[in-house]
Image: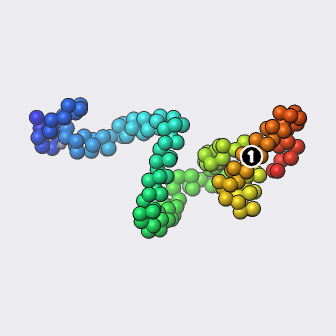
Amino acid sequence: MDCTDCGRPLAVNPKRKGTRCQRCAARVHATSPEKRQRCSQAMKRRFDDPVFRMKQIRSMATGLKRALDADPSIRDRMREHGRRVGALHKGNLTRPAGSPQRQKAARAQSEFYMGWCPLEYRDGYRRMVRIDGIKAADARRMTEELIEVDRSRYLATAVLPQAARGAGA
Ligand SMILES: [Zn+2]
């Protein structure tokens, strides 16, 4: 049997569902808005699973580190690419600062990086990193220790130390 699009003879492939060769099938898939839509939805569903998401993020970070170790010039190319994309001012950057879209994006980003940290400890953590110049990993460990200390003090005294410390402490 031949491919119904390009006429090349089809190799035997028990998984093939249609009548096109791999190349023609990929072209149809990539140019159909309906198929792109379904593909995008399926990918978003997969990324809703926190375990899958975490695994993807880890594997991306590991791969990037391996690539950077092998060829440090990649970092410069990434920086250049980032500048070019930033200069396009696409996406949320077309919205004015303080617009609902920008606020929503900022909240999502903050949740991504600070999700581990209870709200009342975030200002303290940020101060350690931004003002005291403590490394993020160390600041996180210290904050987690503080949370643990507060918790045991609360269990012993029924007073919330983080509330007594006041806002922004
Ligand atoms: Zn074909």
| Res. 117 image quadrant | top right
Considering depth in this image, is 163 or 65 the residue closer to the camera?
65
| Res. 68 image quadrant | bottom left
How many numbered discs sit on the rendered protein? 1
Residue 52 to residue 83: above or below: above
On the question of residue 18 being in view, the answer is no
Q: What is the x, y in percent for residue 12?
A: 15, 35
Q: Secondary structure at mark 1?
A: helix
The structure residue drawn at horizontal position 79% and vertical position 42%, both measured from the top left corner, is 149
- Horizontal placement of 167 versus 91: left or right? right
Considering depth in this image, is 3 or 51 the residue closer to the camera?
51
On the question of residue 150 being in view, the answer is yes
- Disc 1 residue type? Glu
Q: What is the x, y in percent for residue 1?
A: 10, 35
Q: According to the image, label 1 marks what residue?
A: 145
- Horizontal placement of 33 versus 2: left or right? right
Residue 156 to residue 123: above or below: above
